[in-house]
Image: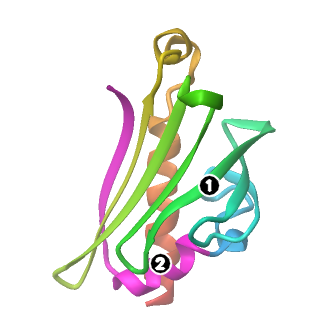
């Protein structure tokens, strides 16, 4: 399995993190490693996301799971499942805060060919978690 993962304990309640995660304007602008998000972040909705890692390329995504204050999944990729990226956001209450995780898993027949050309998204994942912690803790 090919994946990226970040986990972080954040000193804010899950509801505060959730409000940020479902707000395209809050995620856009670069602090989260996301240049822009178009679309509504809601179950079944389609999004277009431009990341700092590839600012000239829009990534089409669909919100495939949504459990407020707990879980959200975005998926996108090539037709027929040849290459799919699935990003899962999880929030779990923890003592005086939230345990946050963000994992992106890549699957499909083409993953072996595409994976070697992909940039290391580890630093981008850390940037996202840092920005989420800063934004959520400032609101709490």
Q: Whole-percent x and y of residue 136?
A: 47, 78
Say which quarter of the image contains residue 46: bottom right
Q: Could you tell me which secondary element the residue under label 1 belongs to?
A: strand
- Pick the residue in front: 106 or 24: 106
Residue at the right extreme of this rendering: 56
Q: Could you tell me which secondary element the residue under label 2 belongs to?
A: helix
Q: Whole-percent x and y of residue 99?
A: 26, 68
Residue marked by disc 2 = 18
Does residue 35 appear left or right of residue 12 in this picture?
Answer: right
Q: Which residues are magenta?
A: 1-22
Residue marked by disc 1 = 62
Task: Look at the picture and state if 16 lies above or below 61.
Answer: below
In reply to whether residue 34 is colored magenta, the answer given is no
Q: Whole-percent x and y of residue 74?
A: 53, 54
Q: Earlier in the sequence, mark 2 or mark 1?
A: 2
What scheme was used to colour the molecule?
Answer: rainbow
Residue at the bottom extreme of this rendering: 140
Does residue 137 appear left or right of residue 36 in this picture?
Answer: left
In reply to whether residue 15 is colored magenta, the answer given is yes
Looking at the rendered image, the quarter that the C terminus falls into is bottom left
Q: Whole-percent x and y of residue 33?
A: 62, 50
Looking at the rendered image, the quarter that the N terminus falls into is top left
The residue depicted at 50 percent of the width and 27 percent of the height is 120
The residue depicted at 47 percent of the width and 44 percent of the height is 86
């Amino acid at each position: 399995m090919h994946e990226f993962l970040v986990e972080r304990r954040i000193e804010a309640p899950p509801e505060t993190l959730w409000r940020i995660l479902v707000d395209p304007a809050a995620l856009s602008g670069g602090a989260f490693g996301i240049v822009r998000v178009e679309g509504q972040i809601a179950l079944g909705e389609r999004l277009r996301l431009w990341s700092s890692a590839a600012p000239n390329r829009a990534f089409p995504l669909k919100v495939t799971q949504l459990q407020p204050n707990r879980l959200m999944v975005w998926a996108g990729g090539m037709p027929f499942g040849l290459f799919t990226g699935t990003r899962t956001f999880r929030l779990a209450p923890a003592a005086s805060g939230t345990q946050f995780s963000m994992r992106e898993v890549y699957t499909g027949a083409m993953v072996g060919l595409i994976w070697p050309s992909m940039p290391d998204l580890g630093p981008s994942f850390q940037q996202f978690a840092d920005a989420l912690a800063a934004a959520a803790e400032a609101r709490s």
